[in-house]
């Protein structure tokens, strides 16, 4: 079970593989909550602060422990009961009949009595097997729906994981902002001491630092909330981790739309439609089988008191009108079967269109990331260096320095937000195709 889950959901694990950077490295360690005692609460809290979790771990935990997925286990057990019940044959009937008694003449008292003991049973004519086939088709559909629910849960976990990773990236940007504010205070302080800048500019710089620290604190609260929402995916009310692993600016190579389109047959939605189609076919066969009336046969032995004789008796009952007894159910079953074909065609159009739109959004996000990272941030960093130097020399005002700082910080924030959009689109593409992007063969 675990091995199959690993294989099926490994597609969610690749897109956030972390780069090896000294500032964001973390050590993976298990925290055995059951062994915590009152004297070790602080130490345990420190361990949790160091604890990180990967996307792969988060997805596996979700599949194994998500409370919403457990309902399918009971639903499948209930369907297995229906399969078992569908295979139960009607019980034979034992019949006893006493005739020609308590009458008049030759039938006075018990003198002319005839006693018949017989056993009867129903000839189902294939109906029971059709019930079994329909029940098995229902089980297959439940299994596919359970797999779809697992994929949806995995996708939701990936999205929540991305939210936590995004707040961690925003936290890094907030730290950069605070560092810039501190450096600005140093520069302004030097000019104030030299009598080249009024005290008001230093006060404004100090207020700016306080605002940035408040923003950093807001991000910390949001990160803790995001981690709690992520942990709830596998039933934890208190997260046993403080950080998630990953580099939000790292992306796999994205295939062309045509290449991704060729992967659409692996979409789990089509498996559900196929299972539903098999269920509708089984329902049609069952309706056709029910159109054939069941025959009832019996056989037994008869005893006659008059001559103390015994004889074998047999009979059969065949209902009239068997060709027209089930037309409504047959028509309904045929219509439902035709409906599944239309639904499959509509689903193909809908999913292919969604894939195209999301692929276009992904391409745009990647273009924005490339432009911000390569064409916007480097010039702004150079501009900030020159502006700070000019400010220290008295050539630029505090407002000009703050303006360049704000532009650079906005660029870093834009890089994070574009990366979030790109990863969100990657998650959706992988959900639509059923294949992680890193596994798709690309054409150069």
Image (cartoon, rainbow, N blue to C red):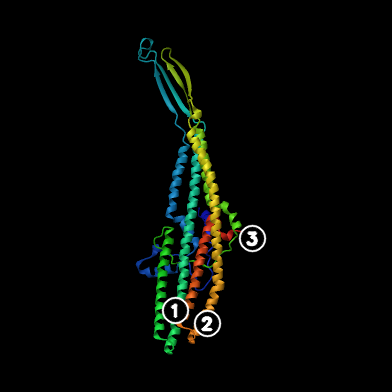
Relative depth, front residue between 187 and 269: 187
Q: State the separation of the CA atoms marked 2 and 1.
A: 17 Å
Q: Within 10 angstroms of label 2, few (less than 14), some, or many (20 or more) residues?
A: few
Sequence-wise, which precedes: disc 3 or disc 2? 2
Q: State the separation of the CA atoms marked 3 and 2.
A: 44 Å
Mark 3 sits on what residue?
A: 443
Mark 2 sits on what residue?
A: 386
The picture places residue 435, in percent across and down from the top left corner, at: 56, 56
Kindly state the secondary structure of the residue where label 2 is placed: helix
Name the residue rendered at 38%, 10% in the picture.
Answer: 106
Q: Within 10 angstroms of label 3, few (less than 14), some, or many (20 or more) residues?
A: few
Sequence-wise, which precedes: disc 3 or disc 1? 1
Outermost residue toward the right? 444
Q: State the separation of the CA atoms marked 3 and 1.
A: 47 Å
Mark 1 sits on what residue?
A: 181
Q: Within 10 angstroms of label 1, few (less than 14), some, or many (20 or more) residues?
A: many
């Amino acid at each position: 079970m675990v091995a199959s889950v690993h294989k099926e959901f490994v597609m969610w694990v690749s897109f956030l593989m972390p780069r090896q950077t000294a500032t964001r490295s973390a050590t993976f360690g298990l925290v055995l909550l059951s062994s915590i005692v009152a004297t070790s609460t602080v130490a345990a809290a420190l361990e949790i602060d160091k604890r990180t979790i990967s996307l792969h771990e988060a997805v596996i935990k979700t599949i194994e422990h998500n409370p919403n997925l457990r309902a399918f286990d009971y639903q499948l057990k209930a369907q297995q009961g229906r399969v078992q019940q569908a295979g139960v044959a009607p019980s034979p009937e034992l019949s006893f009949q006493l005739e020609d008694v308590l009458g008049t003449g030759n039938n006075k008292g018990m003198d002319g009595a005839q006693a018949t003991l017989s056993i009867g049973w129903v000839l189902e004519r294939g109906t029971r097997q059709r019930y079994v086939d329909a029940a098995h088709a229902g089980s297959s559909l439940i299994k596919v729906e359970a797999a779809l629910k697992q994929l949806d849960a995995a996708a939701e976990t990936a999205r929540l994981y991305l939210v936590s990773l995004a707040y961690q990236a925003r936290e890094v940007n907030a730290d950069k902002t605070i560092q810039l504010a501190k450096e600005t205070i140093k520069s302004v302080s030097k000019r104030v001491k030299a009598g080249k800048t009024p005290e008001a500019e230093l006060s404004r710089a100090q207020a700016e630092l306080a605002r940035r620290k408040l923003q950093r604190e807001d991000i910390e609260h949001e990160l803790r909330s995001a981690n709690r929402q992520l942990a709830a995916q596998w039933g934890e009310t208190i997260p046993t981790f403080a950080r998630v692993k990953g580099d939000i600016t790292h992306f796999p190579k994205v295939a062309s739309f045509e290449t991704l389109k060729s992967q659409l047959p692996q979409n789990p939605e089509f498996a559900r439609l196929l299972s539903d189609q098999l269920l509708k076919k089984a329902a049609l066969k069952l309706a056709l089988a029910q159109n054939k009336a069941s025959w009832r046969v019996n056989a037994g032995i008869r005893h006659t008191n008059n001559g103390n004789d015994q004889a074998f008796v047999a009979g059969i009952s065949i209902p009239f009108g068997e060709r027209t007894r089930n037309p409504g159910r047959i028509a309904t079953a045929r219509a439902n079967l035709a409906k599944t074909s239309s639904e499959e065609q509509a689903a193909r159009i809908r999913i292919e269109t969604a894939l195209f739109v999301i692929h276009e959004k992904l391409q745009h996000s990647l273009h924005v990331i490339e432009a911000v990272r390569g064409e916007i941030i480097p010039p702004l960093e150079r501009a900030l260096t020159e502006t700070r130097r000019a400010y220290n020399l008295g050539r630029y005002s505090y407002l000009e320095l703050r303006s360049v700082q704000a532009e650079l910080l906005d660029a870093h924030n834009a890089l994070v937000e574009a990366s979030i959009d790109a990863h969100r689109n990657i998650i959706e593409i992988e959900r639509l195709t059923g294949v992680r992007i890193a596994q798709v063969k690309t054409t150069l």
